[in-house]
Amino acid sequence: MYSGYRFEMIVGCMSAGKSSELIRRIERARLAYLPTIMFRSATDTRSRPDHVESRNGLTSQAIVVETAKDMLKYSSQAIVIGVDECQFFDDSLIDVIHVLLRQKKKVIASGLDLDYRGLPFGCVPQLLTLADRVDKLLAVCRKCGSDFACRTQRVVQSNEQILVGDSQYEARCIHCFEPPSEYQLKLEIPEPQYFAPPITQNVSIV
Ligand SMILES: [Zn+2]
């Protein structure tokens, strides 16, 4: 009886190694002869049909589904289930993952946590609250070379939240990330107070 059922999330910006980590974990389960299955959304048109592909050349066979609910058609025999690019699914993915966990399966999902504006991406934030394990991966910033890139910079003009493709984006660190002007921080920073009063005075310990 399999007792490893739980929900793992792998998130981060583009080029952080999310898909290769997902493939690694699925392959690891396969080596232990656990029945596995991988899904990806039909919205993601970058990989070749019926596969999940990582940028470093790893591939895994996958079933391409139109909706999250379609996963339930194909997952009955599987014990470990991978979901790539989960930001491409709508909120119904949350219910589907609940169902899979109640069926005592292990679900491993990867995806972008933030969109090109630097805002939470679709159903991913809610999935993060449900996950038993979360790994946030970082990339190398394409602008300054620091190895803590956590944002996905769109380098072409478009207001669509989903614009599939690699050449339109690059990984950036928080210092080099430039969101569209309407999403830039508008917080007025107060004058620094150099002579702040002491925080603790006359403290009595009872
Ligand atoms: Zn940078």
Image (tube, rainbow, N blue to C red):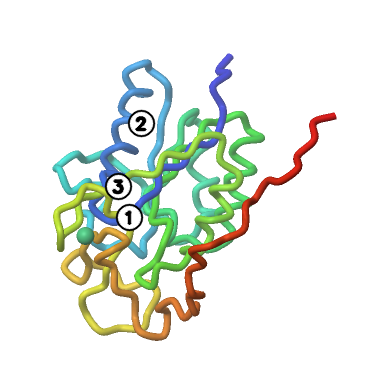
Q: Where is residue 36 shown, x and y percent of the image?
A: 41, 30
The image shows residue 123, relative to residue 104, as above or below, that is below
Q: Nearer the viewer, residue 7 or 178?
A: 178
| Picture quadrant of ligand 1 | bottom left
Q: Are marks 3 and 1 in contact (CB under 8 Å)?
A: yes
Q: CA distance from mark 2 to mark 3?
A: 21 Å
Would you say the beta carbon of the disc 3 residue lies within 8 angstroms of ligand 1? no
Circle 1 SS class? loop
Q: Is residue 168 left or right of residue 73?
A: left
Q: Residue furthest right?
A: 206
Where is mark 1, residue-wise?
A: 150
* Numbered label attached to residue 26: 2
Circle 2 SS class? helix
Q: Amino acid at mark 2?
A: Ile
Q: Earlier in the sequence, mark 2 or mark 3?
A: 2
Q: Where is residue 182 shown, x and y percent of the image?
A: 41, 85
Q: Nearer the viewer, residue 50 or 27?
A: 27
Q: Residues within 10 Å of mark 3 (few under 14, many from 20)?
A: many
* Numbered label attached to residue 138: 3
Q: Earlier in the sequence, mark 2 or mark 1?
A: 2
